Amino acid sequence: MRFDYDVIVIGAGHAGCEAACAAANIGVRTLLITMDMNKIAQMSCNPAVGGIAKGQIVREIDALGGQMGIVTDRAAIQFRMLNRSKGPAMWSPRAQADRMKFIETWRETIDNTPNLYLWQDSVVALNIEDNVVKGVKTAMGVDFTAKSVVLTAGTFLNGLMHVGRVKLEGGRISEPAAHGVTEQLMQLGFTTDRMKTGTPVRIDSRSVNFDLAVKQEGEDDFHKFSYLPTVHRKLKQQPCWIVYTNENVHNILRNGLPDSPLFNGQIKSIGPRYCPSIETKIVTFADKTEHQLFLEPEGETTHEYYVNGFSSSLPLKIQFDALEQIPALKDVHIYRPGYAIEYDFFDPTQLYHTLETKLVKHLYFAGQVNGTTGYEEAAGQGLIAGINAAQAVNGGESFELARDEAYIGVLIDDLVTKGVDEPYRMFTSRAEYRILLRQDDADMRLTEKSFNIGLASRQRYELMIAKREQRDKLIEFAREYSMRADIINPTLEQLGTSPLKQGVKLYDLILRPQLSILSLAPFIPALSDEIEKIEEARREEIVEAAEILIKYQGYIDREQQIANKIARLEHVKLRGKINYDEIKALSTEARQKLVKIDPETVAQASRIPGISPSDVNILLLLLGR
């Protein structure tokens, strides 16, 4: 056995798996170290992938040649496209997954990835010489050498779980915490703090009265996560169920607050604002008489269900008594209670946009160690860290994504520029160019960029080119094909839109909100024939892509113009050109922030909280602009 590798990835969660596969697929010898090879990519919290803004990240991961979309499609037991009532910039795919099939599929993926090796152990120290990482030391006393190391330890760094007043060391329930790495990095000057997250109770579906719950079915159309036409959902699809809390539930929870680690001082770390515990909800929203809960299946065959919306660290008896007050759950059987977990994270402003640390060369951080929350945010970071770790080995150029190129670009720029004061979760509102970052066109934005560095396969690249050609041919047909008013007006009235007074191009009809390409096709033989020319496996996907561009091209062009103007400052390099401490014209806060962040460009400097427009103007003057 060899003990020398090009890249070592610490932790096989969602960030670690993507990082390891990315590095290995680029072609470097990669070692993935995990405490438990049977829990690779464990879904520690809810058994779902995607959601608002998060689904866009998964599509981007897939477009770049990552694995999360493929694995999710193969393990999916329900799929939905959220926000379909809004514009396409807000459409967000989400899937329930079979938790065990998800792990099995990821393990199969890793086992069959060339250049990728597994080692079951815990890393207790990094081997660092002259501020350059050289490898890792494990609990078994093994020294592995590497040219790059990616740390993706999730919630395991000094992890501490809470159920009421009971405290348990661990990174997840029944899994040990990791010690040593945080302490070592603090000695090297890294800033660290503690964060808190939590997970709900798990219940037995055989003890649920589903007649008293509202059924929520999934969708069964062409939408999925992966752009590869060969990847499909194959598992039996399962519904979710909706129930509601009530005043009786809330009263029991209120009576338990003195024993809540969140309210009795036991937990002092930073918790999530956007995914609060049930006890936080009843305090923060004291006027609400009910809260919606989702009963989500954990798998295709298991009876285990996840109670989404009931995250809690209250004592077991309080959780149990409160759930019993919900009519559908009056006979509920609990597999295990919800719990909170505290863990170490590192201030992400200590990273470059490549996710390499500023203090130690060739050391990369990804996932919850950077203060984020969510599988998708972790996986997106892992992919970028893995790419850059491999590029560093190969001597290639760094790989970064701009804010107008990807939600992943927004995520990483927010982290390294602004830092975090609570667990960071992606929202569409964080992206200023949402219409450019739609879930339908991530392949158009990113696949060629990834192909050029050797990650996205030639098959992916050629699929993207073929899709673009077929999409554009359909759009061009619509621009050129003329519609006579007397022929099409009966159809327009039938479809609920006003008749024409004169002839128009088909393109102009598709612009109407009441009409679509597919609704018009049965009445326009030439359009139907044009659609038939599109490859069958991706026909609906390509037609939808064409229609979105037709209907929203004006908005897309306007937003692209704004992005292009801002991009000019992205090309004005700043790092290493100014000694900020000497510039008294800058505010004290600006000097301190600029020294701490050391922005790469003027555009990044402008996004740092506390940097004013006048500060930016001073920087431009100093640069001779």
Image: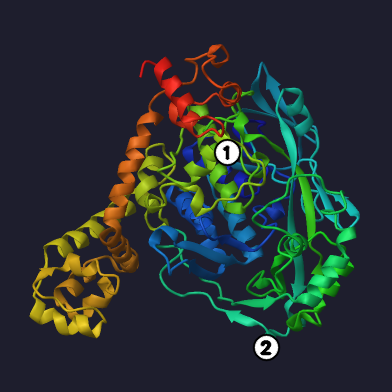
Identify which residue is drawn at 84% across, 61% down. 314
Residue 507 vs 267, above or below: the answer is: below
Residue contact between numbered discs 2 and 1, judged by CB atoms under 8 Å: no
Identify which residue is drawn at 8% across, 73% down. 502
- In the rendered structure, find residue 536 and report the number of the disc placed on it: none
- In the rendered structure, find residue 415 and report the number of the disc placed on it: 1
Where is residue 161 shown, x and y percent of the image?
Answer: 82, 52
Residue that mark 2 sits on: 211
Where is residue 166 shown, x and y percent of the image?
Answer: 91, 55
Displayed quadrant of residue 156: top right
Direction from residue 453 to residue 167 in the image, left or right: right
Badge 2 amino acid: Asp
Where is residue 198 shown, x and y percent of the image?
Answer: 74, 56
Badge 1 amino acid: Leu
Q: From this viewpoint, is residue 233 visible?
A: no
Q: Residues within 10 Å of mark 1 (few under 14, many from 20)?
A: many
Identify which residue is drawn at 64% across, 24% down. 360
Q: Secondary structure at mark 2?
A: helix
What number of labels is visible? 2
Location of the C terminus (image quadrant): top left
Of the numbered discs 2 and 1, the one sitting upstream in the chain is: 2
Displayed quadrant of residue 137: top right
Nearer-the-camera pick, 377 or 580: 580
Q: Residues within 10 Å of mark 2 (few under 14, many from 20)?
A: few
Where is residue 226 shown, x and y percent of the image?
Answer: 45, 58
